Image (tube, rainbow, N blue to C red):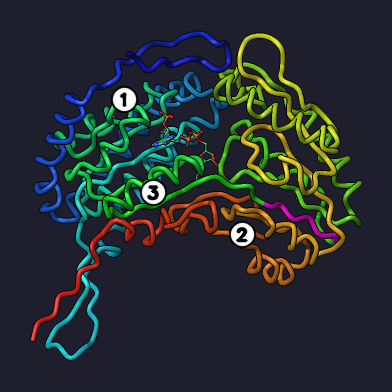
Amino acid sequence: MTFTAVNPASGETLGEVPEWDERLLDAALSEVAAATPGWAALPVVQRCEQLRVVAQVLRDNLEEYARLITQEMGKLIRESRAEIEKCAHACDYYAEHGPAFLHDEEIASDAGLSYVAYLPLGTVLAVMPWNFPFWQVFRFAAPGLVAGNTAVLKHASNVPKCALAIEDVFRKAGFPQGVFRTLMIRASQVKKAIEDPRVHAVTLTGSEPAGRSVAAVAGASLKKTVLELGGSDAFIVLEDADLDLTVQNAVAARFLNAGQSCIAAKRFIVVDAVAEDFVARFKAGVEALQPGDPMDENTTLAPMARADLRDDLHRQVQESIAAGAVATTGCEPIAGAGAFYQASILDSVGPGMRAYQEELFGPVAIVIRARDEADALRIANESSYGLGGSVWTRDAQRGERLARQVQSGCTFVNGMVKSDPRLPFGGVKSSGYGRELSHHGMHEFVNAKTIWIK
Ligand code: NAP
């Protein structure tokens, strides 16, 4: 059996990568277990130096890795280049700040000396999605490796070449054998890996069902988890918003990566006073997007990553229209080769429609009209998700007040939601739990150990 890499822009098969059986999984876990004590024993600064080499390898091979991402999951080549640079930046960030984040923290108590030491947990298993096939991995690996953990990766089935290329980054950077391994296993083998005593913790980025399944297995094995799951971020437009700025960001925030980002703006909640104006301008911006070859610098709308995902999205759209939503533009697959879907707007979305309740993971913006600010907030918080969100208003204080009331892991005022190594990232409600990035992300997978000396 093999993993098949397919170019979603053309439908052409790029190659096959053999799947692992249990014997190969066992051998890899043994290799990682053998490497774990030595890696943990290295001084933090030495691990940081190695991570700087990783950043260099990423930059030296940026074009090759960017092409691989675009070929395997379809995003625009300039977005792929930016993704590799972002990975290198995160490595630099943790190489610089790791020693301070992991420094012993002295705390006055009844002891002669008491402090918290941040020690590694062991081996962290990462179950990762295809939408940012490098970034999602480096986002967990950079802080985890600096903290002294070793890492094993189960990547999404449709990006097997990226999965192997990432392992090769660490090889090129001179990491000891077994500190980072890619496991070529299926989702059905993840349970076995989690239950294995050589795995000590699990981080999953992906859908809600995958999160529930992995958390249940990890819970039964009493292993720490971080879950970064789906989102349906609110993009709240108030009547005093600067509409030029708002619309420009609305298009970018929804259609980056063909709409396949967890923190994409998915629900445009617009107060009635500006709804017509906003939708008219937004429609013009959306209709200007140009689908095409993602390797072509002039293309502005990428294909979706897989044809089956496009079919699922179209079913959500059709059923929402049948329930009363209005197709303002697009809302159809694009005929021909590749998994392209029209840049779309569904207006007048309301309760009871799939688009109101569910995450739409593709190039479809939904507009929900609100009476006023209070109504917009009520709608924003009616979602089962709570990943990110944004508020658009000329009054920054008003925006801040509202931002604090949106139930999410982050809310931006007059800015598109993005991740940044300096700031914690994660969700509430069905978007998961735990944090990545910043010192919060690093501290998820350490033993905060108390040392007490009389
Ligand atoms: P997915 O189907 O859940 O897959 C994610 C990973 O989980 C893949 O490696 C997948 O393996 C694996 N997996 C799936 N079901 C599993 C199970 N029952 N047990 C163990 N592993 C399992 O998600 P996706 O379609 O690739 O990604 C899209 C979703 O991820 C969206 O909901 C998006 O919002 C979310 N996401 C969240 C964040 C965040 O930071 N919060 C970031 C990016 C994406 P296979 O590929 O082999 O099935």
Res 411 label = 2
Q: Position of residue 253 (x, y in %)?
A: 66, 43
SS at circle 3: helix
SS at circle 1: helix
Measure how far apart labels 1 and 2 are at the Cα level. Answer: 35 Å
What is the quadrant of the C terminus in the image? bottom left
Residue 236 painted magenta = yes
Report whether 274 appears left or right of 392.
right
- Report the magenta residues as a range: 234-239
Q: Position of residue 430 (x, y in %)?
A: 54, 52
Task: Reply above or below: 338 against 262.
Answer: above
- Name the kind of residue labelled 2 in the image: Thr
* Farthest-out residue, front: 220
Measure how far apart labels 2 and 3 are at the Cα level. Answer: 26 Å
Mark nearest the camera among 2 and 3 is: 3
- Residue 114 in view in this figure: yes
Mark nearest the camera among 3 and 1 is: 3
Q: Which residue is mark 3?
A: 215
Residue 452, image quadrant = bottom left
Residue visible at 88% across and 40% down in the picture: 280
Pick the front one: 163 or 415: 163
Report whether 79 appears left or right of 238.
left
Residue visible at 61% across and 62% down in the picture: 407
Q: Which residue is mark 1?
A: 164
Name which of mark 2 and mark 3 comes first in the sequence.
3
Q: Residues within 10 Å of mark 2 (few under 14, many from 20)?
A: many
Name which of mark 3 and mark 1 comes first in the sequence.
1
Report whether 187 appears left or right of 446.
right
